[in-house]
Amino acid sequence: MEDLKRHYSEPLVRREIAAYARGRWVGIHCASTSGAGRPLLIRYLWRRHPLRISSEEDAVKLFQLFERLGPRAFYGTANLYARLEAAEDVADLGNVVGCTPTWDVDNVPEAWKATIAAVKEIVSFLDSEGVRRSVYVKWSGRGCHVHLHERAFSKEVLRRFSAFDIGYAVVEYVNSRLAERFLRIAGEYAGNALRVDNEMDVQRLFTCPLSLHKELDRVCVCIAVEDLDRFTPEWTAVGAYRHYEGWNRWEEGEGDSIAAKACAAIGPSPSRPRLRLRRHRPLGEQI
């Protein structure tokens, strides 16, 4: 527990978590387990309020609120919302004001070179489509997340297509173009566990920058695109991590072309939010 407190008391950690989580539906994985033996995942406060972080102070308060449960990993959805006051808000696509297209490059940790090779293919493809300044990469613990900043899409393209559908379509479009290359990488590096899935749905959570992994003693660090060839897992060591602080940048409009192509080729997301009503008190009322 002291290691968790030490890490999450760092000003940079709190600042980066808040910068990513702001506007997103947040989740916190805890070291404590449920009755079924699974690590607790907290997504609501009392009265079914979706968990949210709008400032560094919010991150501190949430850690303190759930401290005895051992808050270990902080997450945020790909979607950003205009309001997060009630459970109904996360089921309303009209409330989604932005979406971060995210490629989940999953693998076993020891096959990290195959993971980075797949990431470089995604980054290169986006570059060929004119998307350069708005791309950032995170090492999530076992693999990588490649993000296309939600503000890379202009208001004009967001009037034509929903942010949620853009997020799904762009990821699917790129994956469909790179599927054979991913298979080749898995073979070349003997990384048979390599997967690049489209995980874009309203429930899916992605790790906040500088969060700890839910199980591994690793930090979720951002990696500058130009540093991908130099990256090693040593950069993710707790207490000695190497993190790229310039991840939160974008160029408005540079994602418009690929968004239009993807939405035309792929169409809207087949996933639509469903509101699940609780039959028990929210965890926040039980502690």
Image (spheres, helix red, strand yellow):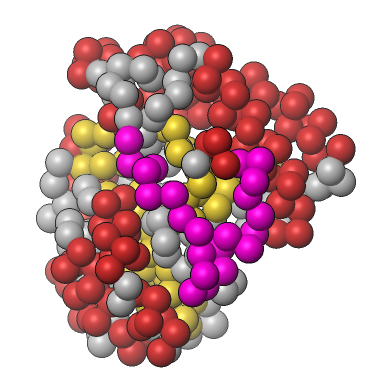
Residue 218 is at least partly visible in this image? no
Query: Which residues lie in the magenta part?
Result: 228-249
Please tell me in which quadrant of the rendered image residue 282 appears.
Answer: bottom left
Please tell me in which quadrant of the rendered image residue 181 appears.
Answer: top right
At 63% from the left edge and 63% from the top edge, which residue is drawn? 234
- Is 147 included in the stretch rendered in magenta? no
Question: Residue 205: where, in percent of width, then height?
Answer: 42, 53
Is 281 placed above or below 110 here?
below
Residue closest to the eye, 268 or 195: 195
Residue 212 is at least partly visible in this image? yes
Question: Residue 174: where, in percent of width, then height?
Answer: 57, 23
Is 188 placed above or below 87 here?
above
Question: Residue 38: where, in percent of width, then height?
Answer: 52, 77
Residue closest to the eye, 74 or 250: 250
Is 56 placed above or below 23 here?
below
Residue closest to the eye, 187 or 230: 230
Residue closest to the eye, 34 or 258: 258
